[in-house]
Amino acid sequence: MPAARMLSDSGLTMRDCDPTLTFPVCELFASIQGEGTWSGRPMLFIRFSGCPLACSWCDEPLHRQPQRAQSMTVAALLAQLRQTAPNLNAIVLTGGEPLAVNGLQPLINRLKQEGFWLAMESSGVGGALPEAIDWLTLSPKTALPESVYQAANEIKYVVDANPDAALLAEIDRRSREHAAVWLQPMARGKRVDADAVARCFDLVMNSGGRLRLSLQLHKYIGVL
């Protein structure tokens, strides 16, 4: 077929990213990872717009504002990544919900070809888990297939000051099955709820070492 010959002649494969494909990006920036296992590590962040969920307590409202999203080709993304922090090779794909992004797998393939280490934070809904991600942080908000939990490198639960019994049971179960389960106190925008912090602290201290505390370091020091 002519199209196949063109791909072959250019050195591309069917898994490469279509240069005309665009991605809805509401933020691209460099900062420290403030949560979980890689807390404190400098990284690049690509925040995609849009999410299938509508959590009332979501502390990243930009993804709900379509007018803030910029449609970017892979070439534009790569150029901005290099301009933002040319010395960093670690990227976090976040949102919104990365799994809901059209063309996510080809984009990941291209970023890997460029030598980036890729982490992704996901609720586990919106689409299939991609291949070639180096680190998956699962932040479940709804029931998910067991395969999604098993694919996660770490599981992070957002917990308020008064978590219900079902959530506590879920956390207890996962902490007995998975080696890296984090509790993150719920925040309202940029403000961390002190009562949620205290509740998470108590749960972690009474977990026998099965739970860890994630404190969103970036919010405490006032950076993105």
Image (cartoon, rainbow, N blue to C red):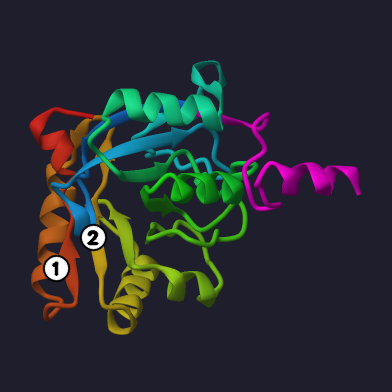
In the image, residue 19 lies in the stretch drawn in magenta? yes
Q: Is residue 8 above or below residue 220?
A: below
Q: Which residue is drawn at 49% across and 18% down?
A: 68
Q: Is residue 83 above or below residue 123?
A: above
Q: Position of residue 152 (x, y in %)?
A: 40, 68
Kindly identify the amino acid type of the residue bearing the numbered disc 1: Val
Image quarter of residue 171? bottom left
Q: Residue at x 25, y 39 (%)?
A: 88
Q: Where is residue 134 in the image (x, y as percent from the top left)?
A: 38, 60
In the image, residue 10 lies in the stretch drawn in magenta? yes
Observer-nearest of 107 and 120: 107
SS state under label 2:
strand
Q: Residue at x 22, y 50 (%)?
A: 35
The residue range painted magenta reads 1-25
- Please give the label number shown on residue 136: none
Disc 1 target residue? 204
Q: Local crowd at mark 1 within 10 Å, few (<14), some, or many (≥20)?
A: some
Disc 2 target residue? 183
Q: Can residue 149 be seen in this view?
A: yes
Q: In what quadrant of the picture does the C terminus appear?
A: top left
Residue contact at pointers 2 and 1, CB within 8 angstroms: yes
Which is more N-terminal, label 1 or label 2? 2
Kindly identify the amino acid type of the residue bearing the numbered disc 2: Leu
Left/right of residue 84 with respect to residue 129 in the rendered view:
left
Q: Position of residue 111 (x, y in %)?
A: 46, 45
Observer-nearest of 79 and 44: 79
